[in-house]
Amino acid sequence: MPRASYSEVFAVREFRAVWASVVLSAGGDRLALVALTVLIYDRTRSPLLAAAAYAAGYLPWLVGGLFLSDLADRRPRRTVMVSCDAARAVLVAAMTVPGMPLAVLVVLLYGATMLAPPFESARAAFTPDILPGDLYALGASVIQTTFLTAEVAGGAVGGVAVAFLGVRPSLVIDAATFAASGLLIALFTRARPAPGKTGGGEGSPLARAAAGVRLVFGDPQLRTLVGFGWLAAFYAIPQGIAAPYAARLGGGPAATGMVMASTAVATAIGTPLFARLVRPRRRLALMGPLATATCATLILTAFRPGLAVSLLVFSASAAFGIYQIAANTAFTARVPRERRAQAFGVAGSGLIVVQGAAFVAAGAAAEVFTPAAVIAAAGAAGAVIALLLTVRWRRLSPPGGRHAARGHRHARTGRQPAACYRVQPAADRSGR
């Protein structure tokens, strides 16, 4: 049976629009964050206030992920994406008003960032509707790679733009990226009705958030898949303490940048290859071993390698992280369509919190132990958890990963996968 190809993915006009919107939105997020952080520091010379502004890249995800992501289950998903982009364009444009108080600037930035989770949840829930079967796995790999690349490039371009154009022109450009993203979605994707107000769609925001948490963590399969996703908190530790690690090796900012870039480049190269060359059934079979390897590889830093070998270790670890495509696809297949956006929001916001806590813990540990020892310890802990998750998954999942293997057959017919492809989680069947 022929495999799905990237040419088939990009032949779908709606996917091309979604993909372009990801480039614009992710890059715009980073551009605004860098520009406003620079503006606040220049006006106050306060590292604390600058850090508070930079925290807007993470903190609002918790609120937005828990309380706003289910909008895309209760409203048409295209409408949610367009509305979020339009609102972010207005909020960022408001930041350019001369004489805007600093407190208002931070609030505007937090508000714009808080709209990222419902946009991303809507996009994640919308993508399986336009890419059925195994085309979804390839599309997800493209979006994941693009998102990572756009964030890295957005930060770099943001610094250059602020240096040469100034803060306010950079913010104007950022507002334009959000407006363009919304137009792409509005003009080049088809309107679809809301999935329906089932499951967690009724009640107060707090009740709906609680229903989303029960959906994800009340089902053993989904809970295990989220665990695989959250392993990123362990193998991303080298990024969190890249500066002290490079400093211990006698390197400066350039070495720090190389440490951070090594993980991004390996992920950007490995993810699309894994999705394209490995069949769905094999991806699921490799998920556990690869998840274990991505953490266990970091144990090699305990031998205190030099910079060149360290970069190879970090690149190898990030490359093994390609298993996330299998986890993402399996997660999507097991969430009811009408709860998909909320499930992605809960899982995504949880990862942000767990990863932030892991970075703080790693930074504190690096005050006492060497950064190499901290990374090795994180890798060992992650590998043990990955092994436990692997054993758990093999007990819970269907033999041979037959659900994922069926998907590509439907991709060739252009139909949505049958109900058997989307296993109803126990939490949903019980009425919760």
Image (cartoon, helix red, strand yellow):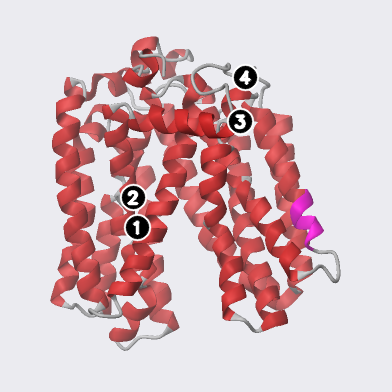
SS class, disc 4: loop
The part of the chain drawn in magenta is 90-95
Task: Tell whether 247 sits left or right of 299.
Answer: right
- Image quarter where the N terminus lies is top left
Residue designated by label 4: 194
Mark positioned earlier in the residue sequence (1 or 3):
3
403 in magenta: no
Question: From the viewer's perspective, is 400 left or right of 129?
Answer: left
Q: Say what amino acid the circle numbered 2 marks.
A: Gly
Q: What distance separates the C-alpha of mark 1 from that of mark 3?
A: 34 Å
Give the quadrant of residue 360: bottom left
Residue where numbered disc 2 is placed: 270
- Measuring 27% from the left and 30% from the top, which residue is drawn there? 279
Measured from the top left, where is residue 404 in percent x and y?
Answer: 30, 23
> Which residue bears the numbered disc 1?
266
Residue at label 3? 71
Kind of residue indicated by mark 3: Leu
Circle 1: element type: helix
Q: Check contact, mark 4 vs mark 3: CB within 8 A.
A: no
Residue 1 versus residue 141 in the image, above or below: above
Question: Judging from the image, what secondary structure is the residue with disc 3 in?
Answer: helix
392 relative position to 137: left or right: left
Q: Earlier in the sequence, mark 4 or mark 3?
A: 3
Going from N to C along the chain, the mark reached first, 2 or 3, is: 3
Task: Work out how far the residue at label 2 is from the one at label 3, CA to CA, in angstroms.
Answer: 33 Å
